[in-house]
Image (cartoon, helix red, strand yellow):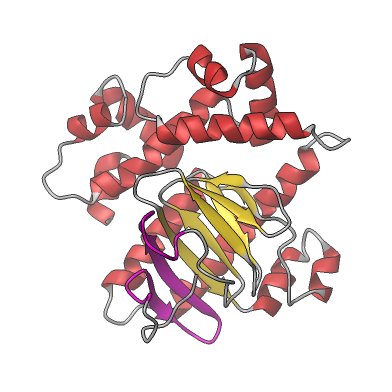
Amino acid sequence: MSVHAGSPRHHIDVVVFESPLVRVGRWRCPADNPVFFDSGPTSDALFAFPRESVWIEHAGRAPFVADANTVTYYNKGQVYTRRKLSVRGDQCEWFAVAPAVIAETLSAHEPAAIDRPDSPFPFTHGPSDPESYLRQRMMFHHVSQEATPDRLFVEEAILSILGDVTALAYARDAARPTPRPRRRDVDLVEGARDVIARRFTENLSLADVAGDVGASIFHLARVFKARTGFSLHAYRNQLRLRAALDRLRQPGVDLIEIALDLGFSSHSHFTETFRRSFGMTPSAVRETL
């Protein structure tokens, strides 16, 4: 990620805001693009919020599903590859921050991070809570639409979001039981996330997901909750709600149509689930965006 306008990939990776402290960009890489599998090492330390689901594999690390419930992390120079999951390829918003500032942020949870500003992130990905996801979308909207974005607002917002999502990543790792989970269980959870990411608008059953990954219903439900912090139902609903944010920006699209297209049983079910998750109604978010 992080390509400047002179690059032949400038239509894939667009920087929309830049200051000495942070850079903000959007990445839109179709699955049939020549750079989809390997776009080269990252030129910045950054974190990203995926819009489309994709498999990511950092060199020397286990592959994982990067979806809208996930924040992905890259140290400067990180080598990684992708595998197709969504027909739309890899789409995300990314936020690059000065490495020394990242290290200072992480040191609140891991004091040793302050000593490795060149590679501050110890994890490849972590959870994305609804509030942080909505805040980054609104902040990205601000820098994309305003002729002169408010630098103080943007920089503070990005650092605040970075602090919140990395705190969740550290808390997730601390909450995981020891010894390390079996490779089979990790693969089961990632396989289930793959299934849900591809079919989150469908009325899936536990048996559907468990059958696709070759696990018992009980075992899958248990290890999925232990590893993600979500039930499969809650995880799927979060993907639906985050997809709704894109639809809300489309003029003339009725809320009932959005609700039914995403798999909710009714407009009221969609609205109440959305409000509980984001703290705002879909109509209020639509007005803001």
Residue at image coords 57%, 18%: 210
Quarter occupied by the C terminus: bottom left
* Residue 11 occupies quadrant: bottom left
Position of 239 with respect to 212 (left or right) is left
In this rendering, is residue 235 above or below 156? above
- Residue 122: x and y in percent read 75, 60
* Residue 45 occupies quadrant: bottom right
Residue at image coords 42%, 71%: 25
In this rendering, is residue 99 above or below 280? below
Q: Where are the magenta residues, as a range?
A: 9-36
Residue at image coords 26%, 80%: 147
> Closer to the camera, 272 or 73?
73
Q: Is residue 30 magenta?
A: yes
Q: Is residue 147 magenta?
A: no
> Closer to the camera, 235 or 11?
11
In this rendering, is residue 135 above or below 233? below
Q: Is residue 276 something that shows in the picture?
A: no
